[in-house]
Image: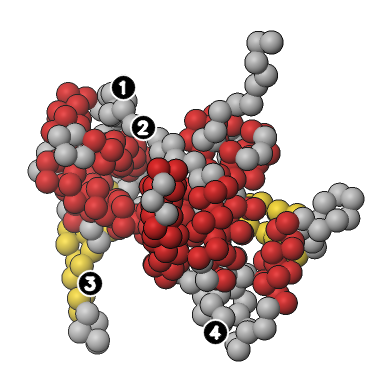
Amino acid sequence: MLRRKKTFASGKVWIGYYYNGRDESGRRVEIPLGTDLNEAKRRWAELDCKPAPVETGLMSLIFSRYERDVIPTKSIRTQKDNDYSLKNLRKVFDTAPIDVITPQHIAQYRDARSVKAKVRANREIALFSHVWNMAREWGYTAKENPCRGVRKNRETPRDYYADDTVWAAVYVKAPEEVKDAMDISYLTGQRPADVLKMMATDIRDGALEVRQNKTKKRLRILLDYANGTRSELGKVIDRISARPRKVRSLFLVATPAGSSLNRWTLRIRFDAARAAAAKEADENETPEMKALAARIRAFQFRDIRPKAASETTLEHARKLLGHTEGQITETVYRRVGEVVNPTK
């Protein structure tokens, strides 16, 4: 393998690697191997029909390539989650050659992490599985994914349901921008991040067009029913559009001054409304109101999406939430029991 070095006028140094080979006629030819030494060694071994050096298959190098090439293609929130998971995975697997890792190692990692973080352990193993699949595509290994068949920790989905009493208690204490966010979230069934990015320009041909951040799913949520009457979502958007503002904002969810909300400003405002509602319920010292105060304190903005899924038919909820299959809609998002008649 040959190493070439160039220094540009700017002072920047370039280093590239080449395979010193021969063409079909026997003449010497240099085949480019790239600028990454580790990848160059692997490519060199392949061209020379030799096993790749063990050090080129260390998980530390694979993790680094995954960080460089894959993580930046994900959403900002997923990037942060992946970075945190990789930090924990690196502590255990960084120095291990990829071909020595077995399902037993993955199970041992799960058990060790589960002492303090059962759910996080599942997320980290899922990420490790994807890293492994990418490593196979990149040619680092031909072995079966060691995560396959390894039991995950049992997770209990959140089952909180925000009934109308809780909703009304918080809603009445909320500022208008939080009321707008609550209404749009409930009527569209979308995630908070997707609600906050909705703009007036997303309204086209009588529908609110949505492209979900997480799944990239596209939806067109109608503002009018087939009979021509205005839907509740259409009325909310009309209310927002008719509201006088000092500065006209393109975002549907915005303060009276025209500033858009982000996840943190929405959370601060929602938490304040929830605290005020719980305090008011607590001041009435009856057992019923004490119980209501406890339910109010447990209410989170993310519970609005499951509320939307729980208060319509399963098929409608599946389409509104953007799910391909109804299983996840039913098991994770629908939080009220099915309505049935008694035996007699």
Label 2 sits on a secondary structure element that is loop
Q: State the separation of the CA atoms marked 4 and 1.
A: 54 Å
Q: State the separation of the CA atoms marked 3 and 4.
A: 51 Å
In the depicted structure, whether residue 21 falls above or below residue 274: above
Mark 1 surroundings: few (<14), some (14-19) or many (≥20) residues within 10 A: few
Q: What residue type is labelled 1?
A: Gly
* First-in-chain label (3 vs 4): 3
**Tag nearer the camera, 4 or 1:** 4
Residue matched to label 1: 149
In the shown orientation, is residue 288 left or right of residue 150?
right
Q: Is residue 101 visible?
A: no
* First-in-chain label (1 vs 3): 3
In the shown orientation, is residue 274 left or right of residue 94?
right
Write the residue at 60% across / 89% down. 246
Mark 3 surroundings: few (<14), some (14-19) or many (≥20) residues within 10 A: few
Q: What residue type is labelled 3?
A: Trp
Q: Mark 3 touching mark 4, by CB under 8 A? A: no
* First-in-chain label (4 vs 1): 1
Q: Which x, y percent locates residue 248? A: 63, 84
Residue matched to label 4: 257
**Front in this rendered view, residue 256 or 150:** 256
* First-in-chain label (2 vs 4): 2
Write the residue at 36% across / 32% down. 156
**Tag nearer the camera, 1 or 3:** 1
In the depicted structure, whether residue 248 falls above or below residue 300: below
Q: State the separation of the CA atoms marked 1 and 3.
A: 45 Å
Residue matched to label 2: 156
